[in-house]
Image (cartoon, helix red, strand yellow):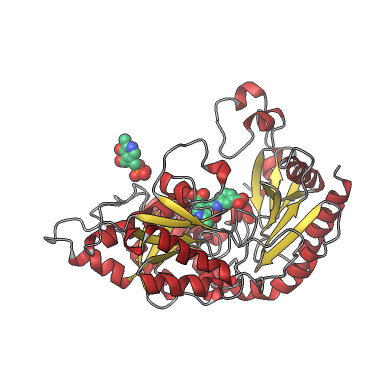
C-alpha cells in the first residue's frame, strides 16, 4: 500500500471510545484522544495523516529513520526474512545474520570496540551496559564498584537503570528508589549563547568527576555514562575538550566510560559514531534506533574485547553461561535483516557524507531563527538541533506544544519536549526541504502568543 492508497481507505475510527484502550507512551493521552493525530502511511521524507494531509518528517520519526520511510530494499528484506526464518531462539542457538551484522557493526566502530551484545531497544542497551559494567568489576575481584555516574539532563531510556543514571527529573520523580547513581553537571550553555556546534568553553565541567570521585572513592564507582551529545534534553553539544577530559579521568581512576549513542550512532553526527566525530573512544558504546532505520526494534552494546574476555575467562566450564543476561528478542532475525540492509543503504546513499555536506547549511538555517520572538537559545550538531523556547508565564511546556501543533497544521512534524523544539531531518533531505521547515518554524514562532 502506498501513501495514496492509504487515504483512499475508509478513515480510521477516532471516537473517544475506540481510542480509550491504548494507553499511549510519553503522550498527553487526554489531549491526544480529544484531538487525535493518526498517521496512516509514510514514504520518503513524508508522513500521511488519516485525513490525507502530508507532513514533512522533521525528526526522522523519533531520531531513527534518517534514510527515509518505506525504502523498498528494507521492505523486501523483511518480507524475505519473515518467510524464511521469522524467529530463532535467542539463547543457546544462533542464526547467521547476527554474526554477519556484528562483524559489520565492528567495522564501523572505533578501534578496539569489537564485541557486540544485541538488545531490542535503547533502554535495553542502557540497562545491559550498566549490568555489564558491574559484573565486569565483580569478575575482576572488585565487587564494591557498583555506583554509576550519569549526567544532569542525560537520557538513557526508561528502564530502572536508565532512569537512575538519567538526569531528566520528570522521568524519575514518580518512581522511587532506583540504582545507586550520582550525576555530573550538564554542559548546556546559558540561554542566549547561540553557540554553533561545539561550545569553546566548558571543558572544565568534566572536572566535577574528580569531585565525585573524591566523594565516593573510585573503588565504589563502576562506570560513567554520557551521551556524546544529549539528544532528548534538546541537543546539548559537548564543549571542546570535555569528552577528552572525561576519558582521561576515567582512565586515571579505573572507571569504565560508556557512551550512549542511541541518537548519535549511525549517521546523525556525519560519522558512524559520536565517538568518531568527537575523537574519544569509550569502553562500551550503546546503539539502537538508526541501526535498522527505525524499521525494526534493535539495539546493541559494543564492548572492548578485554571486557568480553574477562567474562569468558571467569565463565567456568564451557557449557556454563558467562553473562546471565539477554532478551527474547536479542538479535531478532527480522531486525538483523533490516540492519544489514540499512548499512548497505547508508553506503549507497553516501549518508555520512551527505550529513556532513548538509550540516553547514542546516546550521545557517537553524541559527536564522536567532532574534525571532520566543527563541531563547539554539544548539546544533550534525543534522540535529534544539531550540529553547521562552516560557509562557507559569506554563513552561505549553508554548513548545502549541508550536508543534501549529507546525502540523502547516505540514511539518517536529518534536517538542520540555522547553525545546527538536529537529533531526532525514539524512537525505534537500536544502529546500530544510529551508521550508525552518521558514515554517520562524513563521510559527512569530504567530505564537
Ligand atoms: N539512550 C538515548 C541516548 C536515547 O536518546 C534511549 C537511550 C532509549 O531508547 P528506546 O529505544 O528505549 O526509546 C534513547 C531514546 C526525543 C526522544 O524526542 C528521544 C528518545 C526516544 C524517544 C524520543 O528526544 N531517545
Ligand atoms: N516476563 C516473563 C514472565 C517472561 O517469561 C519473560 C521472558 O521469557 C520476560 C518477562 C522477559 O521478556 P523479554 O525477554 O522479551 O524481555
Left or right: 256 as drawn, with respect to 27: left
Q: Residue at x 74, y 38 (%)?
A: 395
Pick the front one: 337 or 210: 210
The percent position of residue 354, horizontal first and vertical second, equals: 65, 73
Say which quarter of the image contains residue 318.
bottom left
The percent position of residue 368, horizontal first and vertical second, equals: 82, 64
Please identify the residue farthest to the left as the structure is shown: 317
The quadrant the C terminus occupies is: top right
The percent position of residue 107, horizontal first and vertical second, equals: 42, 75
Pick the front one: 101 or 136: 136
Q: Quadrant of ligand 2?
A: top left
Left or right: 273 as drawn, with respect to 255: right
Left or right: 286 as drawn, with respect to 20: left
Q: Which residue is drawn at 65% across and 69% down?
A: 382
Say which quarter of the image contains residue 22.
top right
Say which quarter of the image contains residue 73.
bottom right
Up/down of 359 relative to 36, above or below: below
Up/down of 38 relative to 339, above or below: above
Left or right: 315 as drawn, with respect to 250: left
Is residue 164 at least partly visible in the picture? yes
Q: Which residue is drawn at 50% across and 51% down?
A: 166
Pick the front one: 33 or 124: 124
Q: Which residue is drawn at 29% across and 72% down?
A: 306
The percent position of residue 420, horizontal first and vertical second, equals: 70, 51
Is residue 109 at least partly visible in the picture? no
Amino acid at each position: 500500500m502506498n501513501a495514496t492508497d492509504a487515504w483512499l481507505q475508509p478513515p480510521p475510527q477516532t471516537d473517544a471510545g475506540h481510542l480509550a484502550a491504548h494507553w499511549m507512551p510519553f503522550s498527553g493521552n487526554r489531549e491526544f484522544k480529544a484531538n487525535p493525530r493518526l498517521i496512516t502511511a509514510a514514504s520518503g521524507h513524508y508522513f500521511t495523516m488519516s485525513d490525507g494531509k502530508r507532513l514533512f518528517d522533521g525528526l526522522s520519526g523519533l531520531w531513527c529513520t534518517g534514510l527515509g520511510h518505506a525504502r523498498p530494499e528494507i521492505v523486501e528484506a523483511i518480507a524475505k526474512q519473515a518467510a524464511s526464518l521469522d524467529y530463532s531462539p535467542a539463547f543457546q542457538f544462533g542464526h547467521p545474520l547476527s554474526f554477519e551484522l556484528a562483524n559489520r557493526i565492528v567495522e564501523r566502530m572505533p578501534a578496539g570496540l569489537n564485541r557486540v551484545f544485541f538488545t531490542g531497544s535503547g533502554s535495553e542497551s542502557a540497562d545491559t551496559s550498566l549490568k555489564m559494567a558491574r559484573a565486569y568489576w565483580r569478575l575482576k575481584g572488585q565487587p564494591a564498584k557498583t555506583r554509576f555516574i550519569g549526567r544532569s539532563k542525560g537520557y538513557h531510556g526508561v528502564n530502572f537503570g536508565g532512569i537512575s543514571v538519567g538526569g531528566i527529573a520528570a522521568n524519575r520523580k514518580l518512581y522511587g528508589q532506583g540504582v545507586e547513581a550520582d550525576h555530573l553537571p550538564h554542559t548546556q550553555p546559558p540561554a542566549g549563547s547561540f553557540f554553533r556546534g561545539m561550545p569553546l568553553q566548558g571543558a572544565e565541567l568534566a572536572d566535577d568527576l574528580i569531585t565525585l570521585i573524591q566523594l565516593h572513592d573510585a573503588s565504589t564507582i563502576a562506570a560513567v555514562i554520557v551521551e556524546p551529545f544529549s539528544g532528548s534534553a534538546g541537543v546539548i553539544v559537548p564543549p571542546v575538550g570535555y569528552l577528552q577530559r572525561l576519558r582521561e579521568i576515567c582512565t586515571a581512576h579505573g572507571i569504565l566510560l560508556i557512551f550512549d549513542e542511541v541518537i548519535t550512532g549511525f549517521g546523525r553526527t556525519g560519522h558512524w559514531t559520536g565517538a568518531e566525530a568527537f575523537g574519544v573512544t569509550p569502553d562500551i558504546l550503546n546503539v539502537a534506533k538508526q541501526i535498522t532505520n527505525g524499521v525494526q526494534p534493535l539495539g546493541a552494546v559494543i564492548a572492548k574485547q578485554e571486557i568480553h574476555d574477562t567474562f569468558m575467562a571467569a565463565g567456568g566450564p564451557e557449557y556454563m553461561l558467562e553473562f546471565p543476561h539477554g532478551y527474547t528478542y536479542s538479535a531478532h532475525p527480522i531486525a538483523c535483516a533490516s540492519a544489514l540492509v540499512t548499512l548497505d543503504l547508508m553506503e549507497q546513499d553516501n549518508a555520512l557524507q551527505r550529513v556532513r555536506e548538509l550540516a553547514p547549511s542546516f546550521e545557517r538555517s537553524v541559527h536564522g531563527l536567532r532574534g525571532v520572538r520566543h527563541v531563547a537559545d539554539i544548539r546544533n550538531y550534525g543534522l540535529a538541533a534544539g531550540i529553547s523556547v521562552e516560557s509562557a508565564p507559569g506554563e513552561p511546556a505549553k508554548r513548545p506544544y502549541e508550536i508543534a501543533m501549529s507546525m502540523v497544521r502547516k505540514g511539518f512534524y517536529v518534536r517538542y519536549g520540555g522547553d525545546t523544539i527538536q529537529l533531526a531531518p532525514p539524512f537525505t533531505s534537500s536544502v529546500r526541504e530544510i529551508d521550508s521547515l525552518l521558514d515554517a518554524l520562524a513563521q510559527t514562532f512569530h504567530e505564537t502568543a
